[in-house]
Amino acid sequence: MGEGGGSQRMLFFGEFHYKLDEKGRLPVPPHFRAPLQEGIVLAPGLDGCIDAYSNKEWEVFSSGIAAASTSPSKLRKLKRTMFGQAFPASIDGQGRISLPEPLRFYAGIKTDAVVVGVSDHLEIWSKSAWDSEKADDQAQVWQIMEGLEKR
């Protein structure tokens, strides 16, 4: 974000369709390359996708887990899954990141991937899983929005 960015946070948004190359590399949407230049953390997402955080947002996410109030056994399981299966990544000279094989397998990504901005991070989906998730989300979003308006 540059110097003096302080509390300024990047908002990720949009939907971008890409094909992985033969080495499992995925283009990062050009608009998001600069804020992710200092590094990326890839982790399994809760809905069967890969979550991609900037290093700064990963620290925020990690702090939230550390402050969570749950049983010690649940916290250990959460930490094992989120931290034990996370991978560092960086953007190469052509604007791509390498998706580790375990995360590609977890998310069912073979060649077609969709990068989705979800406010504080990106989600990386297999195209078929994203098509299904998107349809399901759109079917529910209007009810969710109406519930928010009544508050």
Image (tube, rainbow, N blue to C red):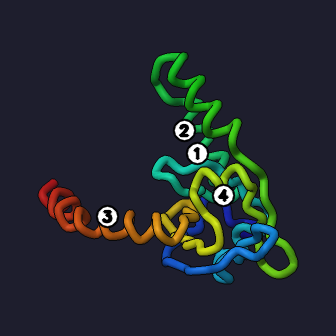
Between 9 and 40, which is closer to the camera in this rendering?
40
Q: Callout 3: 10 Å neighbours few (<14), some, many (20+)? A: few
Q: Nearer the viewer, mark 4 or mark 1?
A: 4
The tag on residue 61 is 1
Residue 11 x/y as whole percent: 53, 69
First reached walking from the N terminus: tag 4 or tag 1: 1
Q: Residue at x 57, y 61 (%)?
A: 121
Tell me if residue 61 comes above or below residue 6 in the rendering.
Answer: above
Q: Nearer the viewer, mark 3 or mark 2?
A: 3
The tag on residue 64 is 2
Disc 2 residue type (three-letter): Gly
Residue 8 x/y as whole percent: 60, 64
Could you say whether the residue bearing mark 4 is in a helix, strand or loop? helix
List the residue tagged with mark 3.
137
Q: Callout 4: 10 Å neighbours few (<14), some, many (20+)? A: many
Tell me if residue 89 comes above or below residue 20 in the rendering.
Answer: above
